[in-house]
Amino acid sequence: DALSAPLGLSAATAMYYDADVSQLPQGYGPDGTPAGPLIGSLPAYYGAGGIVSTPADMMRWLRFNMGLEGTAALLGLLKATQTPSTTVLT
């Protein structure tokens, strides 16, 4: 909520067992039958933020992470949030 409200993300939610997914697009399985989001079945995504939303909200999120959209206060946080906390050895 700390980021979704200032960015105007109207349908963004964290991926939890009780998440409201009524605003999300209809998905389909490999056989063409309707399939809902896999809320709660992929807990590995929780650590990555587990954000699910509409395509429009995700484009706004992408634009924010590219530094193209957002308030000055939020954009000031980008460097800290995009700096790796560990060193990767190659």
Image (cartoon, rainbow, N blue to C red):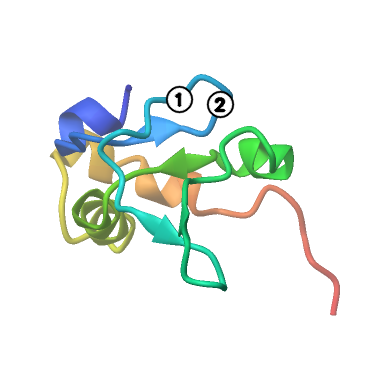
Q: 28 or 63, which lies in front? A: 28
Disc ID at residue 16: 2
Residue 3, placed above or below residue 65: above
Give the residue furthest to the right. 89
Residue at the spot 34% in from the left edge and 53% down from the top edge? 26
Give the residue furthest to the bottom. 90
Q: 87 or 51, which lies in front? A: 51
Residue 68 percent across, percent down from the top left: 17, 61
Q: Which residue is mark 1?
A: 19
Residue 82 percent across, percent down from the top left: 49, 53
Residue at the spot 53% in from the left edge and 64% down from the top edge? 29
Residue at the spot 64% in from the left edge and 32% down from the top edge? 40
Is the residue marked by circle 2 packed among few (<14), some (14-19), or many (20+) residues within 10 Å?
some
Q: How many numbered marks does the figure carry?
A: 2
Which image quarter holds the C terminus?
A: bottom right
Is there a contact, CB below 8 Å, between mark 1 and mark 2? yes
Residue 58 percent across, percent down from the top left: 30, 54
